[in-house]
Image (cartoon, helix red, strand yellow):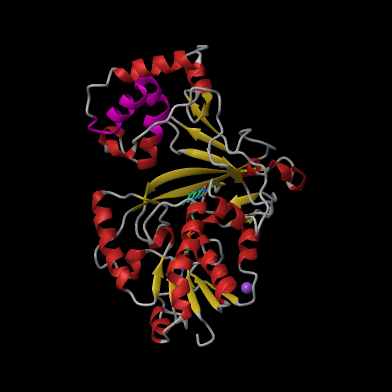
Amino acid sequence: PNNTDLVIVGAGLFGLTVAQQAVEHAGARVHIIDVRDHIGGNAYSYFDDETGIEIHKYGAHLFHTSNRRVWEYVNRFTEFTDYVHRVYTTHNGEVFPLPINLGTINQFFHASYTPAEAKRLIEEQAGEYADITPKNLDEQGKKLIGKPLYEAFIKNYTGKQWQTDPAELPASIIRRLPMRYNYNNRYFKDTWEGLPKDGYTAWFEKMIADPRIEVSLGVDFFDESQPLNRKAIQAAGIPVVYTGPIDRYFDYDLGELKWRTVDFKERRYDEDDHFGCPVMNYADADVPYTRAIEFRNFNPERAESYKPGKTVVWEEYSRFARRGDEPYYPINTEDDKNIYAQYQAKAALEPNTVFGGRLGTYKYYDMHQVIDTALTAYDEQVAPLLRK
Ligand code: FAD
Ligand code: NA
């Protein structure tokens, strides 16, 4: 450790961004450790041997942002394709476009409503619940968009995400259900979107190409039998950026923060194209998974490099995470928020240590948000530690 100026726990986008900044701005010698056998954290992807298809190991990752600083930053390390994200859903044996838009509404009601007519209809259907104070998600959904659309497109999908009957879920899970009264089914509203031209991992490798950044994989910060463990690093007085779970850092002293996880089931089809799109949601309860991802359709520009007549699909099954599962989506009950606030107060007192990223701050962040918070954390919290 004595030739290291900064140790970063976690080679996800938060850790990689801080490492890159520390070298660029402070000429620091950085050592990144990760317990996994690859860099990139949850945004990691690999190219499938059999088919040449890029597979996002921890679920589909689409890059999108309206933040100019982040867009300019990421473009230093990769070009982006012109991919535009669109999602479809299967309900009752029919395929509809999402998010719910005029195309969805007209197909569902077998109608040719104009924007104004559709708006009037939905207001009328939602209006039936105007006097109700929603006690659960079911009532909230009906009050927001009326019973027919809520029950077709939201109810069972959300029930599968939470593995809970929507009548038992708190109304607060969904605050808004925006409707589009036009035919725009572009999923994200951000200024920029796309996928890294040569894949996610090529992008991440470029961020840490500088020889002053060293990476050790398969290394757990809490494993005292390896040299870069917490005790050894703290004893040596080396600053730490910690992007692992904050409750784990404090030995779960104040309780465990709760997460949802997703299990993936892979299917291979002897076809060039199974869905005709990258993401097919399943709105109904009879299909046990929430959605299926067909990875080759994220990168149609690579058609030449794919093995013909083969495609890879991952079905997603959502459930509550237990310790040892991959934590994906913070559940964030009032209880969780309280516990997190207490851990956060402890973290603020931890000398020479900066907590960041989605696990270190118990927040759902998209990639662009993680990069933005990492750039800021470098300037405000990490740079001062390196100057000492
Ligand atoms: P992570 O990527 O989780 O990295 C943290 C790293 O720390 C991990 O590699 C972990 O192994 C390591 N670590 C933890 N504990 C230890 C330890 N004790 N010792 C050593 N290493 C440790 N964002 C988008 O912008 N678009 C999307 O479409 C999108 N889709 C998503 C889909 C899913 C299913 C999920 C879960 C997330 C998605 N995201 C998406 C969010 C994106 O994954 C995150 O914003 C990003 O990965 C967060 O980076 P991070 O560095 O904070 O955390
Ligand atoms: Na390097």
Residue 249 visible in image:
yes
Q: Is residue 208 above or below residue 67?
A: below
From the image, give the main secondary structure of the stretch colored magenta.
helix
> Looking at the picture, does residue 143 appear above or below residue 321?
above
Region rendered in magenta: 134-157
Indicate whether residue 146 is drawn in magenta.
yes
Q: Tell how many labels.
A: 0
Q: Residue at x 37, y 30 (%)?
A: 155
Residue 252 percent across, percent down from the top left = 28, 66
Coordinates of residue 208 in the picture (x, y in percent)? 61, 68
Q: Is residue 251 among the parts visible in the rendering?
A: no
Screen quadrant of the C terminus: bottom left
Out of 39 and 50, give the one closest to the viewer.
39
Given residues 345 and 383, the one toward you in this image is: 383
148 horizontally vs 169: left or right: right
In the image, 258: left or right of 285? left
Residue 202 placement: quadrant? bottom right
Q: Residue at x 38, y 47 (%)?
A: 319
**Considering depth in this image, is 163 or 40 the residue closer to the camera?**
40
* Above or below 91: residue 84: below
Q: Quadrant of ligand 2?
A: bottom right
